[in-house]
Image (cartoon, rainbow, N blue to C red):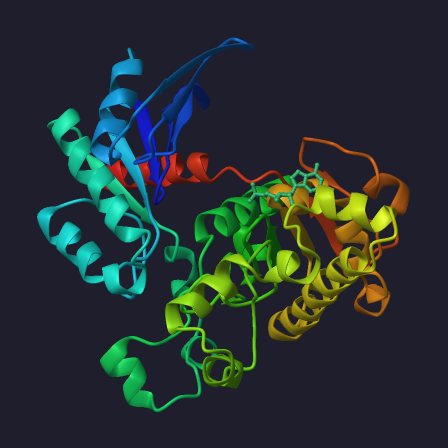
Amino acid sequence: MNILIINTGSSSLKYQLFDMEAATVITGGVVERIGESEGILTHKTFDSGDVQKNIITRPIPDHQAAMHLVADQITQGIDAVGHRVVQGGESFKAATLITPEVKKAIEANNPLAPLHNPPNLIGIRVAEELFPGKPQVAVFDTNFHQTIPEKAYLYALPYSYYTDHRIRKYGFHGTSHKYVARETARLMGKRPEEVNLITLHLGNGCSISAVKGGECRDTSMGMTPLAGVMMGTRCGDLDPAIFGYLMDNTGLTQSELDEVLNKQSGLKGICGKNDLRDIHDQAAKGDKNAALAVDMFAYQIKKYIGAYAAVLGRVDALVFTAGVGENDEIVRAKALDGLDFLGIDIDEAVNNVRNPEAHTIHTADSRVQVWVVPTDEERQIAIETQAVLDKS
Ligand code: AMP
């Protein structure tokens, strides 16, 4: 069965075509700068180790045009389409076959994810036109976090804000947390139900989850992806009174402040850069704020590890994933420094060696295993799409 995975962002569209029997990616790519004067499609075809790349630049006015351009590149048959949808709210506990009712429910969640759900829905509608009669499945970023208990997902606000306005923690990056949790259990030779994990998705966006016996029990992002540890450009957890204080004292409007918290804060806010490769270079040249940004980031990660160790009671493994988690040995070492009292001990020499494959970096004496596992959200969406089709 060939499953096409579609992941539409606000100005981009990523796609991959999986051959599920062979467990391989046949073709895939990304459309960027949708809606700008010049759009760009990068299309790759994988053929037994060889990669053929085709780049097309032309104006791509909207997601509909982007989807048509993608469909023109794919010469292989498509049996089903799996869509990444960011916000499933409480309506969706698991991946689901898309029906008219499901589309309405996704639309009802638009206010909770105004930048993400609308393009996700466009992707679904255009895919239905392009591949008529082929089953379409929605896999939500929030699915994996729906097992978080009420005491952990509620904010201590008037309860009616939850019932009337749906204010609660939803969590994000769920597909990535689920993928690496399953994969790590498999690599440990265990079933997901047998292990307690802290999964650390550290990329430009960052989230950390406590996963007990295969189920998510808490996660650092909140009602929106702004909460939790500081990120490339996002502030993470703040004293909520700061927002009103800044509105009163800076003259910035709500939307301008929103922009500051989302795009001008985090690592970038502290040292002017958001890519850790640049930040480490700057720090090595003596830039104090660059070193401070790394220290703050590692400290916040460490605090979440401590908190989630308490939530889980027993931790079998930590799992680092995404751009920073997979590649940045400095952040990993700093975040784990001094955690030997929790039974976490990494081998610095192994940690310092780049390895694109899933691998461990703990010492032989470490009670807790420490894994670096490349994430693969598209593959997880394909796996879940197939599972929905197998059941239907
Ligand atoms: P992601 O959002 O998962 O694509 O991660 C993007 C981020 O990963 C970048 O902004 C970098 O900060 C970080 N990153 C990627 N590659 C490396 C690397 N080789 N060393 C350190 N950080 C990296």
Most foreground residue, 56 or 371: 56
Which image quadrant for residue 146? bottom left
- Where residue 159 sits: x, y (%)? 33, 89
Quadrant containing ligand 1 reads top right
- In the rendered view, tell whether residue 209 sits above or below residue 3: below
Q: Residue at x 28, y 52 (%)?
A: 117
Q: Quadrant of the N terminus?
A: top left
Tally of numbered tags: 0
- Where residue 256 sits: x, y (%)? 42, 66
Most foreground residue, 241 or 390: 241
| Residue 285 left/right relative to 192 | right
- Where residue 150 sits: x, y (%)? 41, 78
Q: Residue at x 62, y 55 (%)?
A: 200
- In the rendered view, tell whether residue 175 sits above or below residue 47: below
Which image quadrant for residue 322? top right
- In the rendered view, tell whether residue 262 sits above or below residue 158: above
- Where residue 15 sits: x, y (%)? 37, 29
Q: Residue at x 53, y 82 (%)?
A: 242
* Residue 392 visible in the displayed image: no
Q: Residue at x 84, y 70 (%)?
A: 341
Q: Quadrant of the C terminus?
A: top left
* Residue 288 visible in the displayed image: yes
- In the rendered view, tell whether residue 2 sits above or below residue 308: above
| Residue 158 left/right relative to 102 | right
Most foreground residue, 273 or 385: 273
**Residue that sits furthest to the bottom in the current view:** 158
